[in-house]
Amino acid sequence: MRAQAIGRSRGGRTTKIHALSDGDCWPVAFMLTPGNMADCTAAEALIAQMPATGLLHADKSYDSDRLCRQIETRGVAPNIPPKRNRRWKPCFSPFLYRYRNAIERMFSRLKDFRRIATRYDKLAQNFLAALQLTATVCYWL
């Protein structure tokens, strides 16, 4: 049986939606993972779909040396706030980090659709298809 991207957390069964968006809030790529899976491990698959220019903003959960190296090898500068327990803190610009709200606005727009905000689909491929269809309706129609 294939994994259906359903994990367990304190709130019950959860699914995380990982996404890449450009500076104009337009989605570039989506990926689903179980709610109890670490964010930085899922991000490595999304990095391969990232355009090789510019700056990448991400939240603290994506802060890892391995992920930052992978981002830099693609020719992109990571702007990720360091976790509190890091000994060596990489270069981080709070001024540029304010542009990260593009991904938050994209998620807000997608989660206006009840089917995306509350996962009703049993299969991950159906939920991902609904997510992509919703993004198409929101941004391209």
Image (cartoon, rainbow, N blue to C red):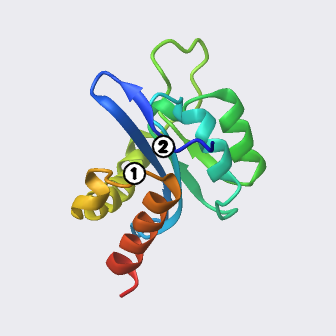
Q: Is residue 73 left or right of residue 133?
A: right
**Residue 59, position in %: x, y?**
44, 38
Secondary structure under the numbered disc 2 in the rendered image: loop
Closest to the observer, 137 or 52: 137
Which residue is label 1 attached to? 100
**Residue 64, position in %: x, y?**
62, 28
Indicate the quadrant where residue 15 lies.
top left
Q: Amino acid at mark 1?
A: Arg
Q: For the C terminus, give its image quadrant.
A: bottom left
Q: Are marks 1 and 2 in contact (CB under 8 Å)?
A: yes
Q: Is residue 60 left or right of residue 53?
A: left
Q: Earlier in the sequence, mark 1 or mark 2?
A: 2
Q: Is residue 33 left or right of residue 141?
A: right
The residue drawn where x is 62% and y is 44% is: 2
The residue drawn where x is 35% and y is 49% is: 98
Closest to the observer, 114 or 89: 114
Residue positioned most to the bottom: 141
Closest to the observer, 44 or 33: 33
Secondary structure under the numbered disc 1 in the rendered image: helix
Q: Amino acid at mark 2?
A: Ala
Q: State how far apart marks 1 and 2 are (Cα).
A: 7 Å
Is 124 drawn above or below residue 41 in the view shown? below
The residue drawn where x is 50% and y is 26% is: 82
Which residue is label 2 attached to? 58
